[in-house]
């Protein structure tokens, strides 16, 4: 990974999933902060208020604003177009749509720690 000071925005409506992601990321030694958002709308708010996000981990199926809609908003913003986004979901059928909308990668839930860290290394250069 590019450094040991990554700031990751984790977006998931399930609090347990957020806590698991935070635990895995912090144990990796490459992440200094995990910011949690419970839907795409909240995540967009975080992105507007912070410019230090290095990676987004994004659930697809969420209330208020789902992952696909958030992907479209983020990729439409010139300043966020290059921000790496990994999609996390249980719905295999959403993979192609997420990639078409600008996701950099895809992981099926339940997420394994080794798979998560390996995938992050492929998108953080």
Image (cartoon, rainbow, N blue to C red):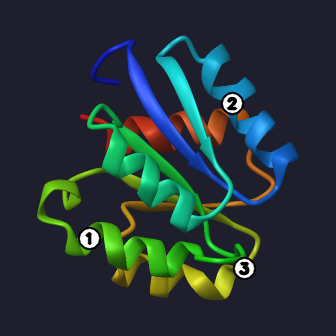
Neighbor class of circle 1 (other Cα within 10 Å; few <14, some 14-19, many 20+) is: some
Q: Quadrant of the N terminus?
A: top left
Is 20 on the left or on the right of 47, as rendered? right
Q: Which image quadrant is residue 42 in?
A: bottom right
Is 35 situated above or below 84? above
The residue at the point 67 percent across, 15 percent down is: 27
**What whole-number distance in Å separates the C-alpha atoms at marks 3 and 1?**
22 Å
Mark 2 vs mark 3: which is more N-terminal? 2
Q: Which residue is mark 3?
A: 91
Residue 33: mark: none
Q: Which residue is mark 2?
A: 22
Q: Position of residue 49 (x, y in %)?
A: 35, 42
Along the viewing direction, whichever of 51 and 114 lies nearer the viewer? 51
Q: Which residue is mark 1?
A: 75
Q: Which image quadrant is residue 94 in?
A: bottom right
Is 54 situated above or below 102? above
Q: Which image quadrant is residue 85 in?
A: bottom left
Is 111 on the left or on the right of 42, as rendered? right
**SS assignment at label 3:** loop
**What whole-number distance in Å separates the C-alpha atoms at marks 2 and 3?**
22 Å
**SS assignment at label 2:** helix
Neighbor class of circle 2 (other Cα within 10 Å; few <14, some 14-19, many 20+) is: many
Is 65 situated above or below 28? below
The residue at the point 24 percent across, 34 percent down is: 125
Q: Are marks 2 and 3 in contact (CB under 8 Å)?
A: no
- Closer to the eye: label 2 or 3: 2
């Amino acid at each position: 990974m590019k450094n040991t000071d990554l700031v990751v925005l984790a977006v998931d409506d399930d609090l347990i999933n957020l806590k698991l992601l935070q635990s895995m990321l912090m144990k990796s030694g490459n992440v200094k902060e995990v910011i949690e958002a419970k839907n795409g709308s909240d995540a967009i708010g975080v992105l507007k208020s912070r410019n230090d996000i290095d990676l987004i981990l994004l659930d697809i199926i969420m209330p208020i604003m789902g992952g696909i809609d958030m992907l479209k908003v983020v990729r439409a913003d010139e300043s966020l177009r290059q921000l790496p986004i990994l999609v996390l979901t249980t719905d295999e059928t959403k993979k192609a749509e997420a990639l078409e909308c600008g996701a950099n990668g895809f992981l099926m839930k339940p997420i394994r720690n080794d798979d998560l860290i390996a995938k992050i290394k492929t998108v953080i250069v």
